[in-house]
Amino acid sequence: MSAVNALRVNGARLLQRLRELGQFGALEGGGTNRLALSDADRAARDWTVQQMRDLGMEVQIDAIGNVVATYAGTEAGTLPVMTGSHIDTVRTGGLYDGNYGVMAGLEVIATLRDAGLRTRRPIQVAFFTNEEGARFQPDMLGSLVMVGGMPLEEALETKAVDNGARLGDELQRISYAGSAPAGAPKVHRFVELHIEQGPVLEQEGFDIGVVEGVQGICWMELTFDGTSNHAGTTPMALRHDAGMCAMRVAAFVAELVQHMGGRQLGTVGAVQLKPNLINVIPSQAVMTVDLRNTDGALLQQAQAQVLAFARKLAAESGVRFSHRQLADFAPVAFDAVLVNSVQQHAQALGLSTLRMPSGAGHDAQMLARVCPTAMVFVPSAGGLSHNVREHTEAVQLEQGANVLLQVLVDAANS
């Protein structure tokens, strides 16, 4: 066995870094609230950048705030192998979503450094701005800009959903509007390690998820504008009820998903009514619809059916209808050779593997536009994520990081 094949990460050190990162934006009773470009995000960024520099890595920050740290290789001029994820969270997030992929990347570098080893190609560890989309939309905004999928100028003008702040101003405020260019990365391979965020690996008893691709995602905001009126004196047939339209669309989404079956998913995650009073017919309803499928054509069909139903319903109800596309990402198939590498290295470590799609969106699906890409999943206890009780056992975190180590080194020596 070669020296590299015998390398193993320090699981206790990895877990310690995760816990320390979790202190930034920590919630009472557990979990984290670290929305993108918030004060908590700035503190977490500063801490993570210091961790990178302490490992002797060169740190660059691009114009959308993505941070990329490089551990130099032995052969000048070779394209780097990159890993990483994100450190922003949802408002009631856990310790592992995104954070694990970044801290595990740093643990890989620490392990190589402790052993006095360098690969032929550089290895980079990155964290991307606003992956969650909880404060700025769309989600995965930083990596989308990095690969040229969204103009930088458009991204900088995006407004925060919590206070209307402009993204570009928030980058300046927290001192993460970097000077490195965004939109033209040169990367040999990209591998992202992540918790599954679902129940499959745990329920079926597998150690490692070998991710073959990411399902497509469609986010829409639907708005119905009707007429506010008295709930006790206005006959049902004479109402222009925006709230009822929203409720019927929500029911339609549930029925559509059940009818389509397969891998079609649908969620109405937010509904806001005005004036939001018990005895007043709503004058306005604003709702979100989240549709996902591994089949791009079926996903488009589902979106078209929801919009057609909403338009017809609004016309019949005497209500004005409009919609806004918040995100629209086609399904992504990862690189077959790199996916096979993940499986082979996991099995060589004595770990059981399951090939599977990712139900959640990830920065890896953006990097797949510019280089061969793959993902590694570890189990999520109870399938919980975006939840303060999100958990993965320490031994599982260590196992995933060891797979990442071997895949990265293999790719970086190619």
Image: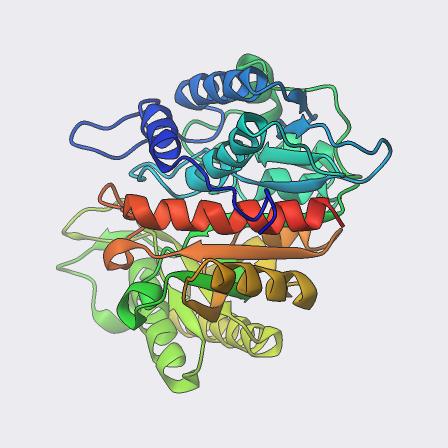
Residue 319: percent from the left, percent from the top? 42, 63
Residue 360: percent from the left, percent from the top? 46, 57
- Residue 386 can be seen in this image: no
Q: Is residue 150 left or right of residue 311?
A: right
Return the residue found at the far front: 1
For residue 281, which quarter of the picture? bottom left
Q: Is residue 136 left or right of residue 30?
A: right
- Residue 285 can be seen in this image: yes
| Viewer-side residue, 216 vs 283 | 216
User: Residue at the location (37% across, 37% down)?
Assistant: 11
Residue 334: percent from the left, percent from the top? 64, 63
- Residue 144, compared with residue 64, is above or below; it is below
Return the residue found at the far right: 77
User: Residue at the location (23% across, 58% down)?
Assistant: 382
| Viewer-side residue, 33 vs 255 | 33
Q: Is residue 391 left or right of residue 72?
A: left
| Viewer-side residue, 414 vs 61 | 414
For residue 74, which quarter of the picture? top right
User: Residue at the location (54% across, 72% down)?
Assistant: 294
- Residue 326, compared with residue 39, is above or below; it is below
